[in-house]
Each structure stands twice: as structure tokens, then as C-alpha cells.
Image: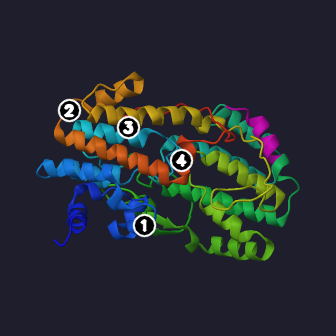
Amino acid sequence: MSSATNWYKETYEASVSSRCWAGTPYGDGWDAGRKRRWDLSADEELKAIVAMELALGGAPGWAARIVETSFRCLPVCGHYLFPLPYVECVSAIGSETPSEFVHGCYTIEAEQKLAMQDYCLCLDAWLAGAAPEAPARELAALGHRRIEWHAVCRDLWDVLGERTELKETLVERLLHSQRWKIKSRPWDDDPCSRFGRDAFLGNFSETGCDANQCGYIARELPGFEERSSPRIQRLEARLAELCADWEWFRYTIQYGWLCSPKAFRHLECLLWSIGKERRAITTRDHRLKGADTVPGFLRCQDTYLNQDEAAAWWREFLGALTVWWHDRQPPGEVGADVARRLAQRTPVKRWLVRLLARRCEMLAETSRSLGLLVDPSPHTKRGTKPLTTQTGS
């Protein structure tokens, strides 16, 4: 080995600690990072973590698998059930048991799908030409969430305004996209087979699930190629003719993921732009000066977190991890929960917890979406959904 740097590079790349950095600059490898501000070789904390791993004389198989699955697949944008994925990492370490299904990107439980189906009913009714009272009565009686559906439908009809071919076509395209996401996104008890069984939403693919490609699920799940649908091809061809901002609308409709912490707020803002028949909002990927301030007409605040609470939990969580691997008892309610889940300290667990802390710090530092959740700006619209930390021991 020609130098200490080369030795460390070789050692790092052979380590288990190098296998969890997806979604951060470290995910591109040792040499790629040196070309940017994120120089892997200068990260003294990561170097110390690798030294801890080497001192073990080899990571046990269960520990390596937790790093390669649960750690690596932590959602880079948070998750609508934040902080569940992070709590599940701690539980996996404590039980020394890798998960067979990592709740990361593109994974959506039935509760979230049912909530979106209620809004889909509203859009379907508008598209059919019904008065707002029609879906409101049904949702008030049968809706998944008990909110002011008469007010929601009335305000949605007002926001969409006068019917035009452009609005109808955009709503039809949006509705198809949301139903595709409901059908094609898995959870433990939903291998992409419980929802949308009566709707053709794209060609079936036996192993095409995005959650398999971007996360970790022990078995391959099917997917549905939405844009292979002739109906979608016709809609998009017509929208390309009708809509001056079609490329923006197509991108924003496609990336309105249901696993996003503010999925329903994003839907609300997109519907506002459809009502205006133009790009009227600013988004993370497409900033817009002078963007409209969108009121909360869908009454969806209960579907996303108060980011102040998320930020407070995050600070306590990272602090608890650091205190625990230093062989001290973490303070506070979050600290007690972390210590309970981790159970008895061992050298392997101390290394894993230190690695998890660094992984979380890097995600928050380098992912704009997660950063907005755990370090929100004063002007970010706050939700009312409680933090989700319930999971196994």
C-alpha cells in the first residue's frame, strides 16, 4: 500500500460501514466525494466508525444486513410516517434482527391510500359534472376521515372554477396518477394487490415495483407501467397541445408521491395551479418568484406533521444515539425509548448506533426534503398529525 490514504481507502471500501450512504454525496464512493466539498477522506467521525468496525474482527451477518438494508434505505425525504423508519432501525439493532420489509421510499400503508381515495372521489365527481353536494354527502357518511367534506367539496369546486377542456384533461391525468400510486405502492400487508384491482393503470410487470428498486423488500413485487397505457398516451398528447406549462404539470403530477411527508398539501397546491390553468406555485425542484399563497381548502392539515415537533424529536433522537454509544443513559422520553429498544449494550451495537447517527446527520445535511422536515423555515405551513413511533420492540 503506497500511502496511508490509499490504505484507508481500501479499508473503507471493504468495510460494512461503507454500504449505507445512498442518497448522500458519500453514495458515489471515495473518489467522487473528493471532487466536491464532501471529502470522505476528511470525515474523522466516519474514520472512527470504521475503526470501531475493524476492532470487532468482522461484522456479524445480521449487523451487515441491517446496514445494507434498513440503514441504506432510510428515505431521503423523510416519510409521511416519520420518524417510523428511523425508530425501526433502532429496533432492528436492539433485536439483532434485520427487517424483511424496510419502510422507506415508495412504501404506503392502507390508511394513506384510503385517505387519497376520498380525494379521488371528489375529483371523479367534479370530472363527471356532479354538484359538490353529491360527493360530500357520500364522504360525510362513508369517508375514511371525519372532516368537513361539504366545505372541502364546495371550496374545491370554487378553486377549479369554470370548466374547460384543459382543466378536465389535467384533472383526468392527475386522477389516473393518484390511482396508479395507490395501486402500485406496497406495504407489509399489501404486495401491490389490494387496491385498484378493477382498474387498468398500465402494463403489469412481475418485478417492476419502484419500492423494490429503490428500497429493500425481501421478495420481488409487481409494478404497473403507467405510461404504457394508451389512455395516458392520448391524454398527454392532448395536454402537450393545450397546455403551455405542460412539462411542469407533467413533472409535478408524476412526482406527487404519496409517501411524501406533505403529500396532500402538494395535491392541494397542484389543484390550485390546475384551477389557474398555469404554473402558480413554487416547488422544491422548480422555484417560482411571486408564487401564489395557497389556502388550505382540502382540510388536510391532519395528514402531515407539525415540523416543529418533528425537529424537536430529531434533535433528541440524534442526541440519544450519541449518548448511548458513549455508554451513558440518554435523557428524556425519546432517550428512554431509544435505550429500551437497543436493550443491552454490546460492541457491535455501539458501532451500529454510531454509524446510524452519522448516517442520519448526513441525510439531514444533504437532503433538501428531509432538511425541510427536521429544520423547517418559519414560513412553512405546519400540520397537526402526531409523530409515528409505534413499532415492535
Q: Measure the alpha-carbon separation of dots 1 and 4.
A: 30 Å
Q: Which residues are magenta?
A: 147-157
Residue 244, percent across and down? Answer: 79, 72
Q: Earlier in the sequence, mark 1 or mark 4?
A: 1
Could you tell me if residue 137 is visible in this image?
yes
Residue 229 is a magenta residue: no
Helix, strand or loop at label 2? It is loop
Q: Measure the alpha-carbon separation of dots 1 and 2.
A: 40 Å
Residue found farthest to the left? 57
Residue 280, percent across and down? Answer: 78, 57
Mark 4 or mark 3: which is in front? 4
Q: Is residue 319 left or right of residue 133?
A: left
Say the numbered circle drawn on residue 371: 4
Q: Amino acid under label 4?
A: Gly
**In terms of image quadrants, where is residue 28?**
bottom left
Q: Which residue is mark 1?
A: 208
Q: Earlier in the sequence, mark 1 or mark 2?
A: 1
Residue 91, percent across and down? Answer: 30, 37
Q: Residue at x 26, y 44 (%)?
A: 352
Say the numbered circle drawn on residue 87: 3
Mark 2 or mark 3: which is in front? 2
Q: Which residue is mark 2?
A: 345
Helix, strand or loop at label 4? It is helix
In this rendering, is residue 159 above or below 333? below
